Every structure is written in C-alpha cells, then in structure tokens.
Image (cartoon, rainbow, N blue to C red):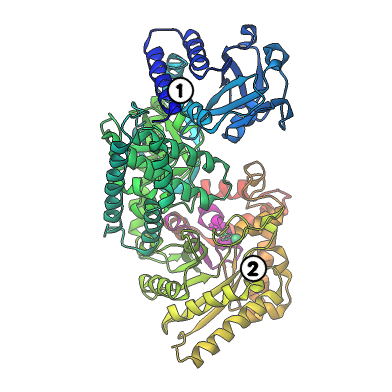
Amino acid sequence: MSETQSGSRRLLGRLKQALAEPAEGQERLDRITRLIAEEMGEPVCSIYLFRDDVTLELCATEGLKPEAVHQTRMRLGEGLVGRVAASTKPVNTGNAPAEAGFRFMPETGEEIYSAFLGVPIQRLGERLGVLVVQSKDQEPFDEDEVYALEVVAMVLAEMAELGAFIGEGAAMAALHQHPVMLRGKVGQEGACEGQVLLHEPRVVVTNPFADDAEAELNRLREAIDKLRVSVDEMLNVTELGDKDQLDVLEAYRMFANSKGWLRRMEADINRGLSAEAAVEKEQTAARARMEQVPDPYLRDRLHDLDDLSNRLLRLLTGQGSNTGVEMPENPVLVARNIGPGELLAYGRGLRGIVLEEGSVGSHATIIARALAIPLVINCDRITTEALNGDRIMVDGEQGTVHLRPEESVATAFRDKMAMMTKAQERYASIRRVPATTVYGPTIRLDMNAGLMADLPSLRSSGADGVGLFRTELQFLVRSKFPSRGELAANYARVLDAAEGKRVAFRTLDIGSDKVLPYMKPQDEPNPALGWRAIRVGLDKPGVLRMQLQALIRGAKGRPLTVMFPFVAQFDEFRAARRQLLDELDREERLGHPLPKTVEIGAMLETPSLAFAPKQFFEMADFISVGGNDLKQFFFAADRENERVRRRYDTLNVSFLTFLEWIVMRCGETKTDLSFCGEDAGRPVEALCFAAMGFRTLSMRPASIGPVKHLLRRSNLAEVREVIDDARASGAQSVRPAVMDWLRQQG
Ligand code: PEP
Ligand code: MG
C-alpha cells in the first residue's frame, strides 16, 4: 500500500468520525476543512457550495480569512473555483494567477498561496460544490494528492446526500408538501393515477475505502459476471421480440462488456477504493460527461452506462432495485432518466412513467411505447419535487403531471380519466366503421409510425393504413449504420405487420434535430433550414440508393409507396424519383422481384413547393402536407421553440387559405393529397382540413378515434360555410367561429 493510500485512508477514517459526531451544519463544515488541511499537510482547505443554480459561496475554510466565509461568492464559470464547478473537472496549478479565468478575491487573503487544487463535489451528475486546497509551493499538486482530494470530495458528496453534511433536511422536507403541477412532453399517451416510485432512491455506499484490494477486485469481477448474465437474459425476453428493441439491448450489452469501463474501475480499486466506490466514481464521471454531450443519441448511450452502473451497485451492495421502499400500489415511476434495461426490469407493473429528461426517440420511450405505459418526458423538476409514495396523476395526452394534487384537482382529473375511458369505449365501437361525414364524403384516416412497436396500433386504432412511416427512427435507435439486408428485412416486417394496408415509407429525414451518431454532425447556424432530408439524400446518393434498394427488396413483390421528405423544388423531386426508377431498373436486372405497384410522392413542407410548376403536381403520385414543418416556415416560427410555437394558430385564416391553395393545385392535376403533421390528429383541426378539401389525414394512432368520432357527426359543407364566413369577417383565426358552431351542435 502506498504512503498516500494509507494517508487517504486515515483521512477518511477521521472524516467519518467527524461526521458521526453531533454538530450543527457550520461547525461540521469547519471541522471538515480543518482536518483535511491537517491530514494533507496543506495550509488552506476551503469548501464552496452552491447557493442557487449558478452561485457558489465560500462556506467554510481553514487558512483563508474567516470573515470571507459566506461573503465570498462567484458565479458558475467565474474564477478557478467557478471553472471547476462548470467543467466538473479538477483544476491543478502551481501558479494560480497565471491560469485562464483566475479571479483574485482580496477579502480571502489568498494572494500568498500560489498552488491551487480544486475538485468538484458532485454526486451522480448533481453538482454540489467545489473542494479546494491551496499552498505556497510553486508546484502543482501531484497525482496522488489530486486523487486523494477527489475521493474526499466524493465522500463529502455522499454525506451531503445523506443530509449529514449541510443539514438542510428540514428545508427540503417543506419543499415536498405542496401540490404542484408540472409540464413535460408527451412520450406515450394515456392517463393514470398512482403513487410515486422513485427510481434509484439512492444506493448508499457506506464503505468508500477497502483494505484488501484483491478481495475488492474479486467482488467487482463477480458482480460484473452476474451483470453480464442478467443482460444476456434480458436479451432473451420474448415479450419484446421485435428488432428495434433487441437492437437497443444489443448496444446495452456492448457496454456491459466494455473493457475500458472495467479497467478504469479496477485501477480505482487498486488505488484503495472499495468496489462500490469505484463503480460510483465511474458513474459520476459518466454523468459529468453526459451533462456536456449535446447529442441526444450519445447522451442516451452514456445513460446506458449509467443504468449498468446502477445495476452493478445493487449487485455489490445487495440493496434492492428500490432500496428500502416497498413497491406501492399503482406505482408511477419517477426518474431523471432511465435505461432500457431498468425499465424492462420494472415491467408491466408500472401505471405510468415521468422522466425529467428523455426524448421522443430515446430507448426508454421506445420501451414505454411497446409496453403501452403512459409516459411524460422532459418534466422539469420532477425528481426534486417528488417523494416516494406521493400521490401523482399523469396526463400522457397533455404531457402534464399533478403531484400531491388537491382534492378538487384530483376529482377533476378522475372525471377526465373516466371520460377518457368512456370515450375509448366509444372509439372502440367505431373502430371498424369508416370516417364518413354526414352526407359524405368519407375521410381516409391513416396513422403515423416509425418503429415496429407502433404497428400493432394499426389494428387497435382502426387506421386505414400508415400515411407516414418515419424511417429515420429505426436509424436513430441504432449504434451503427444498418446494412441494406437488415433494412430490407425491417421493411418487409413492417409490410407483413401492415397486412396489406398501404404504408407510405418516407425516406430518411435526417439532419436538423435528428443527428445520426455514425454520421459526422454538421455545424449549422440554422439546422432546420439546413442540410437535411432530401438535400442530404441527393448530395450523398449512396445512402439514399441503399435505402431505396432495401425498400424495393423489402416489398417482396407487394405494392410499395415511397415519399421524399422536405422537397422544396421540382428538380429535387425529379432527381429523387429518378433515383428510385433507376433502382427499380437495377433490381430488375439483378433478378429481384419488383413491387406490384410503385407510388412515388413528395412531402410538402416548404411553402415554395405549393407554387411549383404544374408538371410537378402531374409527376407526383401523391403529396402529403407535413404541417409541422410547413407551419414553422409559413409563420417563420420555430416548431421547437415554446415561446413562438403556440403563437400562430393552425386555423389562422392565412394558413387555411394557403392549405386551400394546395388543395386547389392538387385538384387541378387530380393528385392525391393528405395531411400528416401533428395537427391532423387534433379533432377540430382535422375537421377544418376536411372542410377545406383534404380527404386523407394521417395522425398518431390515439387520435384516430376522436377524429373519426367528430367527423362522423359533422356536415362538412356546414363547417365550410362557418369557415368562409369567419374568413370574410376579417377574423384572424376561424377557431372561435368553428368552436361556437360545434357548441351549438352539442
Ligand atoms: C411534418 O413536418 O409535418 C412531418 C410530418 O415531418 P416531421 O414531423 O417528421 O418533420
Ligand atoms: Mg417534417
């Protein structure tokens, strides 16, 4: 054992002792800084803690002027302390004033200390503060000292977690008593009521140091072996036999077998940490990296690692998957984020899931969709607000969450749930009947899909077909580019599951917010207006060709419908269509069976395409309005920006008049027309689109019932009259008039 290691152990022993003694918050902090300074033989040790999200405060010091305590503050990123906090990486220097960002704080009297070592106090991605030692030497601290201070910071963070460090338990408890309503985004529809089950309610590492490294290495290896077996078992889950989910789990298995991960943990153990402390140290480092990775896909991958670390910690500590907490009745899982493996381990017992992070394409979302569990994602503050056992109501339709709701809110919510259940029954009863409006016409209702997991909805929703299959989703959940064979098999399975119903495959719409991990990200100032969708397809024809070949092969002689995304001008469509025709020729030459029929269409997502030459409308077999993009470009309002997104009503007179123009252009050439943006799934919007002349609408499966129900009770000619009157009146939106009319209709 090295001298430093035994020194660190002694320091830790004293630290534990100090923390076990009764003391108020401040006294405790003072003791800690004193003993770290003593044990490390340095004149200065200081603890800076976050006062709010962006302000750090000197909370205790040994060696700096006592009057600076609770006076000296800096913002995140400011000075060396702020830099440590912002980067969550140590700063170690023999010449602090020469460091970038150095800020001299005269009130502390630190000017005589040249060497500075600051390490973050953080626990599993939560930044708590910065621990600093300073000395008069002109040398940076050595590697062992950095390591020792990091370990001490880790222990301090653990203590903070236990409430033994800052003594803020009482204040925290008060925070958790009031009802709150939180807003997130829809991950999976449905509503539920239940009790909070906090995911990872802390695996507590009580033995950060271990004397017998060999024994710890054995414990770690044994736990890793068990972990691998359990991941392998998970991969055999037949319930989720579909390919998308298996791919997700494959990527996960890769991590479980990662040599680098194991090697780093072994190195930590060799330096004196216990097996669980080594796992947690790696996990904390992974979370810090996660914070800094903007790419959602890579964040999901790092989250897989986080998920594995949790499992490993549970194996090592023997603490259950929800430490000390009984599975409540009607559990609603609350987590910052969750990995696919962990979610599968909870299984179908969950009533709902609320995540602070997450994304529509994340693995957790895919699994939740497959299990049909209501899911709200991006729900800010949920993990800090919720306590185990809290009453919670989740509205997966609206993306809202009521925590500890007042009785009146709870009653209203229950009424709403009962109405939804009734409505579901009503929708189920019209599942097999067409969406024929009063006096006709019949509107075709398709659904939007993107993964195999979506296809069972084709039957349960009563959709006429898939009006938009977003092929990029299958690319986004993978860790590497799929091969043509894999893709063809995928598309064949989609068509098998569609049982003869029409599926409009949209070719890859990547770029903008959908960045594939295996493609070089573009640094673009305005990605939504940038190199995306068909623009990438035409500039990198290899990818487009491969996808077209896979589609042709996947069709296996059945009808094939292909649509190209984000076409802004005729030439783009002509070129993309040419590619498909060339691929059809090539496949024929190679002796592959050709699809029985081929329909080639374009998505109309840019206003320019509505004014394309007539020849474009003649050439396109069909056109589908991508209202999500079209609306953002029509109003110049970013669809991802909450501030501006809701500002412009879809039923705005200008927009409806523009849609009318598109209907007219398609009517001239008898080109089939549909609407497949999210608005098609909103009953009132759907009704107005139908009244403007749309005969096909494509939407989320859950919207089919409500939209069909309204259409079947409406006379489109009357709706059109209401719309036209409102337009003539100078109204900005026809919504108020249509809503009035609907109310009159009861
Ligand atoms: C649209 O833009 O309306 C659309 C359906 O495409 P996406 O939402 O995938 O961009
Ligand atoms: Mg679009």
Q: Amino acid at mark 2?
A: Val
Spot occupied by residue 550 in the image (x, y as percentages of width and height) = 48, 77
Spot occupied by residue 614 in the image (x, y as percentages of width and height) = 71, 78
In this view of the protein, which residue sits in the foreground, 82 or 644?
A: 82
Q: Amino acid at mark 1?
A: Leu
Name the residue at 67% across, 72% down: 539
Image-quarter location of ligand 2: bottom right
In this view of the protein, which residue sits in the foreground, 185 or 656?
A: 185
Q: Which numbered disc flags the more N-terminal residue, 1 or 2?
A: 1
103 relative to 504 in the view: left or right: right
Residue at label 1? 156
Residue at label 2? 536
The number of numbered discs placed on residues in the rendered structure image is 2
Spot occupied by residue 413 in the image (x, y as percentages of width and height) = 40, 35
Name the residue at 46% across, 11% down: 28
Decide: marks 1, 2 in contact (CB < 8 A)? no
In this view of the protein, which residue sits in the foreground, 731 or 147?
A: 147
